[in-house]
Amino acid sequence: MATREVAIFEEQTSITGTSDQFVVLPDNRVSAVAKMTASGTATLQMTVDPVDVIEANNATWVDSAYGLQAASFADAAIGPVTGIRLNVASGTWTLKVLQA
């Protein structure tokens, strides 16, 4: 699984499984938009593990409070989140991550 460091904005399209791992700075406000492009369900997941743990694919990922979604949705966090990813159960999705 690839890891992307989010400078300000990153986007991944055509997600049909687990997205790349988006690494963010823990002191920043992070917004994520999951856009369904073909009917299905997905869950946004976050971690607070250190970057080296994320890059080693050993992070503990926790579902956002919204849980499994069957329509496009958004979520936000104010630290100490260090990583965000989208876990797609079915369909095709796009994930957009912004930090400021």
Image: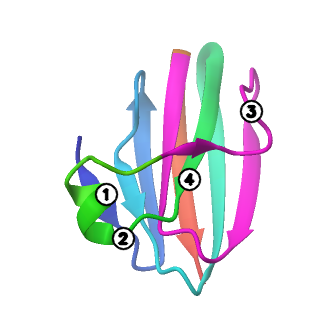
Percent across and percent down for residue 51 are 31, 69
- Left or right of residue 25: residue 98: right
Instruction: Quickly name the residue at label 2.
Output: 50
Residue 85 within the magenta-colored segment of the rendering? yes
Give the amino acid type for the residue marked by disc 2 in the picture. Answer: Pro
Whichever of labels 3 and 1 marks the residue nearer the N terminus, that label is 1
Q: Residues within 10 Å of mark 4 (few under 14, many from 20)?
A: many
Determine which of the numbered discs, if any, sits on residue 67 in the image.
Answer: 3
Looking at the image, residue 54 lies above or below residue 86: below
Q: Residues within 10 Å of mark 1 (few under 14, many from 20)?
A: many
Give the amino acid type for the residue marked by disc 4 in the picture. Answer: Met
What span is in magenta? 61-89
Give the amino acid type for the residue marked by disc 3 in the picture. Answer: Gly
Determine which of the numbered discs, if any, sits on residue 54 in the image.
Answer: 1
Residues marked 2 and 1 touching at CB (< 8 Å): yes
Distance Cα–Cα, label 3 vs label 1:
21 Å
Looking at the rendered structure, the secondary structure element under dot 1 is helix
Distance Cα–Cα, label 3 vs label 4:
12 Å
Instruction: Quickly name the residue at label 4.
Output: 46
Percent across and percent down for residue 12 are 41, 46
Looking at the image, residue 87 lies above or below residue 53: above
Q: Going 59% across and 25% down the picture, which residue do you hit? A: 37
Percent across and percent down for residue 77 are 71, 67
Distance Cα–Cα, label 4 vs label 2:
12 Å
In front of the other: 12 or 62: 62
Distance Cα–Cα, label 3 vs label 2:
23 Å
Q: Residues within 10 Å of mark 2 (few under 14, many from 20)?
A: some
Give the amino acid type for the residue marked by disc 1 in the picture. Answer: Ile
Determine which of the numbered discs, if any, sits on residue 64 in the image.
Answer: none
